[in-house]
Amino acid sequence: MINDILTIVRKEWKEMFLRRGSYRTGMFNLFIILGLVGILLPLQTGVEWLTNPLLLIVWSWLPVFLALSMVTDAFAGERERHTLETLLASRLSDRAILFGKICAAVVYAWGMAVVGMLTAAVTINIAHPGAGLRFYPLPFFASAVVISFLAALLFSSLGVLVSLRAETARQAYQRLSVVMIVLWLLPTLGLQFLPESIKASLNSGLQGINLDAVVLGVIAVMLVANVILILAAMAKFQRARLILD
């Protein structure tokens, strides 16, 4: 089954990079994203980028944004291109197809988030030399890695559920975009444009609470939500019904 899942993952990545015309275009888009979260935003924020707990929202938003277009195309796009029937008629099991599509989005989105974190650390060290090697505090970095993974898994599972029933990839994209904007994009952009006085107040407030407990609570909630969404996707993925649709 692992090999079958990897087959789907490779297929999804190939289609994603070539969907807009060429492999070069796909890579160019990735460099733009890395340039934003790995260079531009860290340069604007400064060394606080490595320690500000509010920036955990950024590292949960990035994989959500990256997974969006891939998961909306997962089944709705196949249906539009009339390739869904061929995929469902293959020897691949239902679980291999479903988990392969989820894994493709998760590994891509989460991997890019981790690369973005490391790129940002390099940017900060280049922009602010002379004080030794700077890096995220280990608990902060571990939390960012775990939360970004769970966010990617959460949105990928939700996206597959939406894509299973959407008539077109555009319809699925629009539905998921609303969720992304409300839960991730608005808070992330809001943090960037808040006055410095308000940012300082928020940071002071965070200093007075048990941040570790809050992060663990968020991780626990995301874990439960992921389990529910994956189980729902497994229940909704019915090959016979999809073929008839």
Image: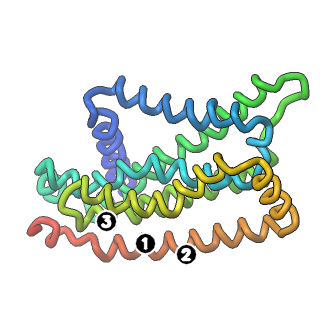
Q: Earlier in the sequence, mark 2 or mark 1?
A: 2
Q: Which mark is residue 162?
A: 3
Mark linked to residue 229: 1
Quadrant where the C terminus lies?
A: bottom left
Q: Residue at x 49, y 63 (%)?
A: 182
* Rendered location of residue 20, percent (x, y): 28, 33
Please identify, in this view, whether the residue under mark 3 or under mark 1 is nearer the observer: 3
**Percent x, y of residue 63:** 51, 50
User: Which is more toward the observer, 174 or 84?
Assistant: 174
Task: Please state if 77 lies on the left or on the right of 151 as rendered.
Answer: left
> Can the viewer see residue 90?
no
Res 224 label: 2
Residue ranking furthest to the left: 244
Identity of the amino acid at label 2? Val
Q: Residues within 10 Å of mark 2 (few under 14, many from 20)?
A: few
Measured in 3D between alpha carbons, the distance from the residue under mark 2 to the one under mark 1, in whole angstroms, is 9 Å
